Image (tube, grey):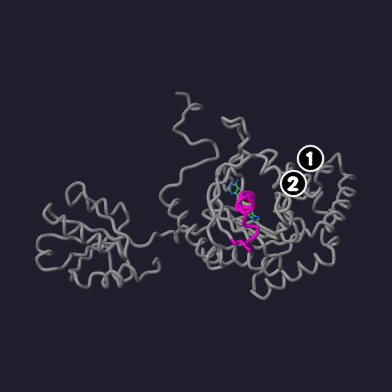
Amino acid sequence: MSKANDDTRPVRGMRDLLGQDSAGFDTVVDTLRKVAQSHGYSHIETPILEFSSLFARSLGEDTDVVGKEMFSFIDRAGQSVSLRPEGTASVVRAIISNGLTQKLPQKLYYWGPMFRYDRPQKGRYRQFFQFGVENLGEGAPLSDVDIVSLAYNGLTRLGIKSKLFINSIGDQASRSAYKAKLVEYFSKYEKDLSEDSRRRLTTNPLRILDSKEANDIRLVATAPSISDFLTVEAAAFFERVLNGLGTLSIDFSIDRTLVRGLDYYDHTTFEFKADIDGQSLAIVGGGRYNGLVEQMGGPHVPAVGLAFGIDRIMLAYDASKLLAPPLIAVLFVAKGDEPMALELAQRLRKKFNVVFPVEGNLGKRMKQCNAAGASCALILGEDEIAKNFVTCKFLKDGPGYTSGLERAVSGDTLEEFLTQTCFSGPNT
Ligand code: HAM
């Protein structure tokens, strides 16, 4: 089979997560779930496949995500469906189709795979994972502060160094005035703009600020600033968001060009960026989207949300912190000792993670314990069973023990012993 047809490779831009990567993934999702719950969010699960028109209407026809990056296809019933490129549109759809716009606020979190047909590179995949939260129904600036602080708390708990960039793109009135000024400015340089930006000059001038083309970026640097066009109300709203962040001592930089890559935002937009192998990449992105529910056919519902990029967080995460919780191994010596060992493994699983290798002789099973990364092996033989103790052999160096050390431990105090030894270290 030629390399191009080798179907044992994953599809370009998609990858398997194994070993350290999958352990890191679990840690990140578990941590973010706890943080989202601590802010009063509950779980929502939406389908991975939605009608293509849902994304076109909500994210904007003219965005890169909709125009160039969707995995769309015609299903067997002849309908155009797409793999979700993000989660907000689906959550809004779910709120409307389940009649939840009558029960506000809805504070929901979700995580899972998203799909964008972008050029794959480090930190940019065609299948990637997000952890998102959406607050539907709350319109006060303090809700924006709460969302930003949720991101801050999640990243802090994961020990990730990042910088917060924040902006306000104002309300509709602010943006209409600003767009007119932008068109006036960029029209002067029309021939220098990229093809996409030239088109967006008439379709969606704000999108030019988000261009990745070098020439466009140069022109954006001296473009008029949204700050001069915010209405009094929009400026006051932004001020209150920034004051709230000040109260929480969350540092930020204002980035007047931060419009984000999706069309549904208004007022607050923000990103947390981290340095990943010398590249500054957004690891969290979000903002307010007061108009979206109504635009999708529901009532007026103010909303604000964000999504963490799990893949990028894993790249920014210190791998040394990815230690899984300590693992205990239970080993029987001879066949006759099996039932007692089986019972012991079952008993210890109430408190600990336990491996219980069952194939091969004792030496081979001991190797399996080492390969699994167990901190210690609890050995049960005839003698141990007769005298109600286990032989604990440490397989790693730890706070109160070294690899190779053996201890006879009474069966009655085993849990206490394990808690004090293997579980007293920094990785518990
Ligand atoms: P987004 O900025 O498009 O926002 O994506 C959020 C995060 O997902 C990014 O900051 C980045 O970390 C990660 N991400 C995006 N594309 C890729 C990719 N190709 N490979 C790896 N990671 C990627 C949204 O999706 C909005 N739905 C966020 C939101 C929720 N706004 C309001 N509510």
Q: Which mark is residue 339?
A: none
Q: Which residue is mark 1?
A: 194
Q: How many marks?
A: 2
Name the residue type under label 1: Ser
The image shows residue 106, relative to residue 371, as above or below, that is below
Q: Quadrant of residue 178?
A: bottom right
- State yes or no: residue 332 in magenta: no
Across and down, in percent, residue 297 comes to 71, 49
* Label 2 sits on residue: 211
- At 44% across and 32% down in the image, what residue appears? 8
Is there any visible trace of residue 393 in the rendered image?
yes
User: Could you say whether the residue bearing mark 2 is in a helix, strand or loop?
Assistant: loop
Task: Look at the image and tell me whether residue 279 can be seen.
Answer: no
Is label 1 in a helix, a strand or a loop?
Answer: loop
What residue is drawn where x is 88% and y is 52%?
181
Residue 288's x, y, as percent? 70, 59
Residue 100 in magenta stretch: yes
The spot of residue 166 in percent (x, y) is: 71, 62
Q: Is residue 317 above or below residue 79?
A: below
Mark 1, Cα crowd under 10 Å, few <14 / some 14-19 / many 20+, is: some
Q: Earlier in the sequence, mark 2 or mark 1?
A: 1
Magenta residue span:
89-107
**Who is closer to the viewer here, 408 or 79?**
79
